[in-house]
Image: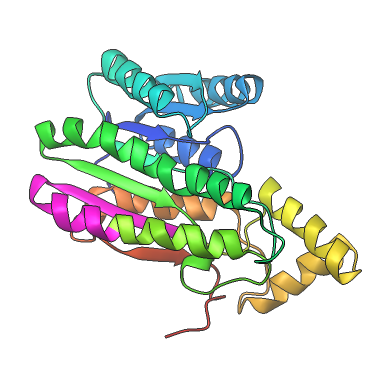
Amino acid sequence: MDTGLKNRVAIVAASSQGIGRAAAEAFAAEGCRVAMCARNPEALQTAAKKIQKQYSAEVLAEALDVTDPSAVHRFVEAVVSNFGGVDICVTNAGGPPAKGFLAASLEDWRKAVDLNFLSTVYFAREVIPHMQRKHWGRIITITSITTKQPVADLVLSNAVRAAVVGLVKSLANEFGKDGILVNNVGPGYTATDRLKELAKSRSAVLGKNENEIFESWAMDSPLKRLGEPREVADTIVWLASERASYITGQTVLVDGGLYKGL
């Protein structure tokens, strides 16, 4: 299937590992020029060099904190300077800590808003003008199944990621006339380092070992297994492609059927 993505410029945030890295790899495999960022410079450079070599791709990698609007601005300007524009922007950030409502401090809330909501605002503000000039663009946010179905002890994620969906719908409505499609991808339980952190936290609360936690999550899905980062990445690439040219303002769950609603 021709995705129409060859030579497109794709920014992927938090792409040194997990779903972000899988998305960067998937875009490189489609012939995109890929701009990667993450907080850990060593992990980022390792991932970028591997992708560059494996796919003979043009890769720009820069370590930054997505909660710093000035850093995001400089990064996007560097992408435009190096690649001539921005066609695709995948926003992504690590999830907030697993806590119940009374255990979450006001500082926890502020950090969750900065990390999981405002980071998307920062990227959108920077890339939309460049996409408007081309009358073509894709903004894809990575959130969680928690946007559709709250998860116990993840009150920060349940609340803040839902705000991202409101932003996605608003941007889709406002900028559709400019040829910009804006969608959200909500992974279910996916085999990443983030899931290991959640398993450790849940293990301490429930008094079960981490393997039992993973098994219980897998059994919740009709497919009876955890998702793989590449499966989420494939959905992201599809949403960015010409094959999804009439889809905008949507949340697409990649959860193995975990969501119980209609």
Q: Quadrant of residue 121?
A: top left
Q: Quadrant of residue 88?
A: top left
Is 43 on the left-hand or right-hand side of 184? Answer: right
Is residue 191 visible from the viewing direction of this image? Answer: yes
How are the residues colored? rainbow
Q: Nearer the viewer, residue 73 or 54?
A: 73
Question: Which residue sits at x=60%, y=65%?
Answer: 155
111 magenta-colored: no
Up the image or down, 83 lies above or below 132; here it is: above
Relative image position of residue 51 (x, y in whole percent): 52, 27
Question: Which residue sits at x=60%, y=43%?
Answer: 18
Tell how many labels: 0
Provide the residue span drawn in magenta: 169-186
Q: Quadrant of the C terminus?
A: bottom left
Is 226 on the left-hand or right-hand side of 139? Answer: right
185 magenta-colored: yes
Is residue 87 visible from the viewing direction of this image? Answer: no
Question: Which residue sits at x=52%, y=55%?
Answer: 231
Is 51 on the left-hand or right-hand side of 34? Answer: right
Relative image position of residue 168 (x, y in whole percent): 31, 56
Relative image position of residue 48 (x, y in whole percent): 53, 23
Relative image position of residue 35 (x, y in whole percent): 41, 26
Up the image or down, 239 lies above or below 93; here it is: below
Question: Which residue sits at x=60%, y=55%?
Answer: 228
